[in-house]
Amino acid sequence: MFKYNVRGENIEVTEPIRSYAEKKLGRLEKYFGNVPETTAHVNLKVYPFPAEKSAKVEVTVPLPFLVLRAEETSSDLYGSIDLVVDKLERQVRKYKTKIHRKSRERGFDIGNEPNLIEEKMEDDENPLEIVRTKRLSLKPMDSEEAVLQMNMLGHNFFIFEDAETNGTSIVYRRKDGKFGLIETD
């Protein structure tokens, strides 16, 4: 059902690496029934820095009803593949639980939704629950000031009104320690 596009950066994708990635990602297929043929994009990266050698695996599976995406970094390429597949399985189970819960609440069949194969769900999975709501007024500022405000508050993101565009923007701290900016239209 899935086709695989496995490519490497700073690494030659050998047949054992390709077959291991395909075998592990094949575990995801058990969650889907009649899904059209899809290409799973797998990107393997190796960072050969002398101090800390690490391997990063990024997987994107575009489905008609859902895009599965995960990335993991560890010191071992095969370990990174295992971690990313575990993360993708959690995403599928969470999505499946959400769809079934909504269909029960609204009292209708999910005939238009993907044919996800039934699996016994663990009791420890928590539904998505909003436990706190905050209201804020957005202050006009530039992105540099927003980063300073975010750091001062000790947060990982900060919402602000962009003084130049008058639109709502978000600055956030990336995993690599740098900052990102999301602008709205």
Image (cartoon, rainbow, N blue to C red):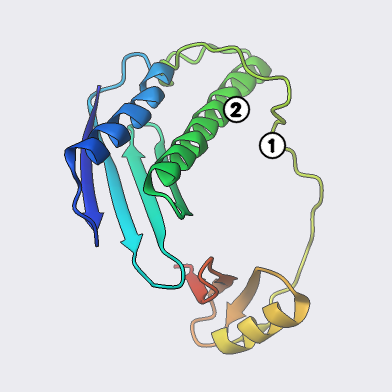
* Residue 142 seen in this snapshot: no
Within the image, what quadrant is residue 56 found in? bottom left
Identified by mark 2, the residue type is: Lys
Of labels 2 and 1, earlier in sequence is: 2
Q: Position of residue 128 (x, y in %)?
A: 69, 36
Residue matched to label 1:
128
Relative side of 8 to 175, left or right: left
> In the image shown, does 183 or 173 lie closer to the viewer?
173
Q: Could you say whether the residue bearing mark 2 is in a helix, strand or loop?
A: helix
**Label 2: how many Cα within 10 Å (few below 14, some 14–19, many 20+):** few
Q: Position of residue 136 (x, y in %)?
A: 76, 68
Seen at 35% across and 31% down, the residue is 25
Relative side of 133 to 72, left or right: right
Within the image, what quadrant is residue 21 found in? top left
Relative side of 53 to 168, left or right: left
Q: Is residue 89 above or below residue 121?
A: below
> In the image shown, does 132 or 177 lie closer to the viewer?
177
Mark 2–mark 1 Cα distance, whole angstroms, equals: 8 Å
Q: Quadrant of the N terminus?
A: top left
Identified by mark 1, the residue type is: Leu
> Cβ–Cβ below 8 Å for labels 2 and 1?
yes
Q: Quadrant of the C terminus?
A: bottom left
**Label 1: how many Cα within 10 Å (few below 14, some 14–19, many 20+):** few
* Residue 170 seen in this snapshot: yes
Instruction: Please tell me how many numbered marks the rendered image carries.
Output: 2
Residue 98: assigned label = 2
Seen at 31% across and 21% down, the residue is 35
